Image (cartoon, grey):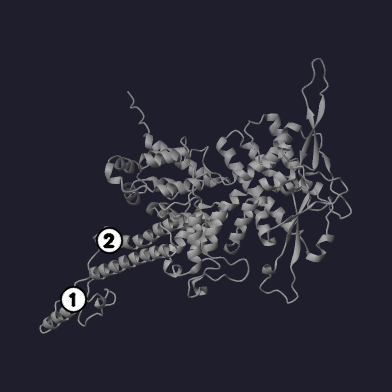
Amino acid sequence: MADAAPSVPFKAQIITHLFAEQEHDRGSAIRAINPVDESEAFKELCEACRRGDVKTVRHLIQFGGVNVNAVDNSDYPPLTLVSLPIFFLVVLLHFPHSSYLITVTYLNVGVEASLCGHYDVVQLLLESGALCERDTFQGERCLYSALNDRIRNLLLQYDFSKSIDEKQPFASHLSSLLNLSPLDTSDVTVTTTYHSPPLPNSTETPTYTKEFHLHRFLLCARSKYFRRKLLPQEESKKSPRSLRLPSSIDSAAFDSTVRFLYLGEITELFSSEVTINIERISAHLDLPSLWDFALASGDPKQRRLKRMDEVDKAQEDLDAWFNEFVVGKVVRLDIEDAHKFHMEQANDSFADVVLRADEDVDDRPVNASPDWKPQAVFYPVHKAMLRSEFFTTMFTSSFKEGQKPSSTDPLQIIPMEIAPNILELVLKFLYSDKVAVPLEHALDTLYAADQLFIDRLKNKVAMIISTQGNAGLPGDNMKHRDKKGNGEKLGGSEGYNVYDVVRAGWATRQRRLEEFGAKYIAERLEDYLEGEEFAELVLESAERIKSRQEIDTIELIDDIRYYLDQRFRMRMDNLDAEEMYDEGALPQHPPKPAPKEGQAEAQTEGRREGEGDAQGKKSPEEEPVRQGQVWTEEEMQADFMRAEAIKFDELLGRVDLLLEKLKLDA
């Protein structure tokens, strides 16, 4: 009897399958959802996740350009690393490829692993777009390896349906333009031919026409074919308002093409007939990515990856259109001549409204000529891309801005109470969802986003201020600080200090900025306590509570006390000195070396003279170091901890004195 063929171990099958997937992803032009990232920034992100360093993780996500869904060489994404117990991570570092050993070890860890698991970092990764899908290998492993029920429940709350896709609002807005509601901004009609099945007892194939109401600027930005057809090549010619495609292009296939261009969801499987027509359309409209998407229609994973790539391409296309036909077509006039400006409806940008922003004296460039004067800046824009409740309400109201002009009227000009450079940043975000806001313009951009009800831009700018501002704010540099601790503002509206940031957080309802301001002040409290503006800010914080009672606290003071405690606790944690915060557990002053013979009597006499004289006592840091005195490293650390504890109590006491001076109880 022949021996039975040996069965392949289940673990070997899994490893073989994972290896095949990695080889497929490497050889394919499509990027994987969880690609291997060997960059230094990603390694730093993984290490910060292991430590639970929220600040470093937030900075790398916002400004390091890392992919939070990538994996390291051991096939672990950051979300899994930050959810693992500490003993699990130690074994992982020593045996990075021993998955079976790691799993068995973890199951026997028990209570010993309760010291790890960073909830705040897990929440930050999930809010930043990290995926934890239950029906995937990475998602199930992350849930299985979670330290405790608190982290596991948080992971379950952010299932695929709740995972944040930062590009989804942009794609959703473009696809909503096809509904023509609540605002119809279409300006071109594309007609196609629909071929219906033959009628019974007839050999003729009935044909019908179908009209698509679309947007010229979007078609030109996304397709070279439509740019050649719709964009006038000569100044004397006008762009057509209607376009008829060849009869060989079927309406059903073109309907899928339109949804593809507008980033709509295409979930149905293409029939062989529709696939053939899409191949013809992709060649005719010069859309090779459309044909690639059609080929992947039967594979959900490939379809999803293709759509992600197409969203990125759409952002690049619209960003290029914005730079060329909005910023490139800007008109600048002296303010006294601005009333003479008008723009016809037939324009190269296909704009249907003009936004006007006037420069101010504070907007004067650094290298401006002596005869520089403020100007009025006109931006030709498209109502379809002004995705804000402010503009939607304006254009759908019964007021002048909501009335449809006649074909001979010039475009409406809407004045904006926003500086031109700030308005340009806002428009760039509205058109492409991609904008790099400089720190010096961040506060003005925040107020502009709040004025226009653009919450996503507000959150983005608040993140920029709270991360980049840690090193110093444009108008709050310590070198530009007077003796009273009041921050000097740099020239122009670009200079702002931490007081402006806190007030902006109150005005725009950005709790992140309030916390950032409190932490910023706590880390430099010595420079702010004597400042008059700081006292005014404390009063404003107290007055924000309506019908204030004596037992009410002051939010700003509470936050400053919290971050002040964190400031000193972090220093002590490095020295294993958390006990210094326990009442009565302050470390004693380092012991003095034994006095030499002949010195004991003099020192005893000196102590007698100093008894009862409180003013004669000196703090440990004020006492001179005696000749021959040698301190060990432990004694020096103890002295440093004692000095830090005294400084901590002193700062808290000065805060209490300020509250007494302001007649506030907190």
Residue drawn at x 54%, y 71% is: 488
Contact? badges 1 and 2 (CB < 8 Å): no
Q: Viewer-proximal residue, 113 or 273?
A: 113
Residue 75 sits above or below residue 533 on the image: above
Q: Viewer-proximal residue, 236 or 365?
A: 365
Displayed quadrant of residue 264: top right
Residue drawn at x 71%, y 54% is: 322
Q: Check disc 1 and report its element: helix, strand or loop.
A: loop
Q: Which residue is mark 1?
A: 611
Which quadrant holds the C terminus?
bottom left
Q: Which residue is mark 2?
A: 580
What percent of the width, then of the height, locates residue 481?
Answer: 50, 73
Q: Amino acid at mark 2?
A: Met
What percent of the width, then of the height, locates residue 206?
Answer: 82, 24
Among numbered discs 1 and 2, the one appearing first in the sequence: 2
Residue 477 sits above or below residue 132 on the image: below
Tell me if I can see residue 257 in this picture: no
Along the horizontal axis of the image, is 72 left or right of 459?
Answer: left
Which quadrant holds the N terminus?
top left
Residue at mark 1 to residue at mark 2: CA–CA distance: 28 Å
Q: Amino acid at mark 1?
A: Glu
Of the residues tagged 1 and 2, which is closer to the observer?
1
Along the horizontal axis of the image, is 198 left or right of 171?
Answer: right
